[in-house]
Amino acid sequence: MALLSQPRTVRRLSAVRDAPVLSDLGHPGAVSAEAGDDLAERLPDVAAVQSALDGADYLCDLDLASALFCAVRLPQPLLLEGEPGVGKTEAAKALAAALDTPLIRLQCYEGIDAAEALYEWNYPRQLLGIRLAEATGADVGEDQLFGRGYLIERPLLQAIEHPGPRPAVLLVDEVDRADDEFEAFLFELLAEASVTIPELGTLRAAHPPVVLLTSNRTRDLHDALKRRCLYHWIDYPDLERSVAIIRRRVPAASTTLAEHVAATVARLRALDVQKPPGVAEAINWVAVLAALGLDHLDAAAADQTLGTVLKYREDLDLARAEGLDRLVAGA
């Protein structure tokens, strides 16, 4: 009987970042005819994408809608970059809602590896299986201990194994927080919609996921990863769109309050702050003011709630030194 001596967590973070790209601009996997027809019917053009996202309470411009349309219809991974709080993660959530398909999210962080991203073996259950076999006199081999019944699926494998009929939306969130080796680990998934598990072989997606990666640009991503993706930069929305987004997310707030906050956030963003406030902070600020029963923004209200929108003491001091009266002037 082959005994299990230790967990066999795969760490396939090999140095393949400079390996030839099998499909730099190709499709990571063929969408089935049935799924393709369904996607074409649901999102026939860019305008339909905008409308569907609007129905999911996400307001986007034509450029972002075009990028998402291509990511769905080609299909090809899409890398969304932008400052924190501009709506990158929300775009993935809204797209999943628009497609009426699951959102599978992998939150990246420093040190993430295959055990957290792809799969790991259920070591306690394997040990239990060994002890049960020993107690009953049964024979158990590695092919049994390392079968699907002992496999714990993590987000990447869940996306590959999604049964359909529509592809899942796979969100690889804040990929810039991971390291170069993890980027290289993603190449197979991005280029071929497949993953390799040594004990089981290469698994290819029957319904290749719609892959969205986000980055806050805390570091530069490798060119080899970017070659495998479409790219779109999400900028801060203009004042009109900011007001519309705030009103959509905080319907209880008045239009006047939304306008006041959107304009003030734009002024705060123009200061030399460590963490410029984004749309997410503007939404939170309006929600806080509305919860406090305030229907307008003045210097006193701004001072009372400034920590909602600025997250560093130095930024708070800078804003107050600039003069909150001036920052909310015209608001």
Image (cartoon, grey):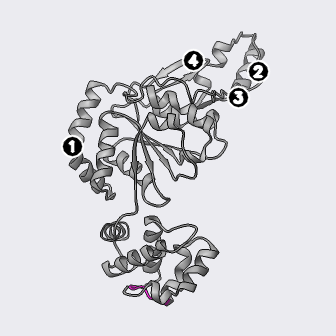
Name the residue rendered at 45%, 28% in the picture. 191
Task: Provide the residue designation for mark 2.
Answer: 131
Q: Which mark is residue 200?
A: 4
Sequence-first disc among 4 and 3: 3
* Residue ID for mark 1: 45
The boundaries of the magenta stretch are 295-299
Q: Position of residue 264 (x, y in %)?
A: 43, 78
Circle 2 residues within 10 Å: few <14, some 14–19, many ≥20: some
Q: CA distance from mark 2 to mark 3?
A: 12 Å
Q: Secondary structure at mark 3?
A: helix
Height in image: 278 above or below 213?
Answer: below
Q: Residues within 10 Å of mark 1 (few under 14, many from 20)?
A: some
Q: Nearer the viewer, residue 3 or 87?
A: 87
Tag in front: 2 or 3:
3
User: Mark 2 or mark 1: which comes first in sequence?
Assistant: 1
CA gap, disc 4 to disc 3? 17 Å
The disc label shown at residue 123, or none: 3
The majority secondary structure of the magenta stretch comes to loop
Q: Secondary structure at mark 2?
A: helix
Closer to viewer: mark 3 or mark 1: 1
> Callout 4: 10 Å neighbours few (<14), some, many (20+)?
few
Q: Earlier in the sequence, mark 2 or mark 3?
A: 3
Between the residue at mark 4 and the residue at mark 1, the CA separation in whole angstroms equals: 39 Å
Of helix, strand and loop, which one carries label 4?
loop
Quadrant of the rendered structure where residue 54 is?
Answer: bottom left
Left or right of 148 in this view: 48: left
Label 1: element kind:
loop
Distance from the alpha carbon under mark 4 to that under mark 2: 24 Å
Q: In screen coordinates, is 236 left or right of 47?
A: right
Residue 22, horizontal then vertical, whole percent: 45, 22
Q: Are marks 4 and 1 in contact (CB under 8 Å)?
A: no
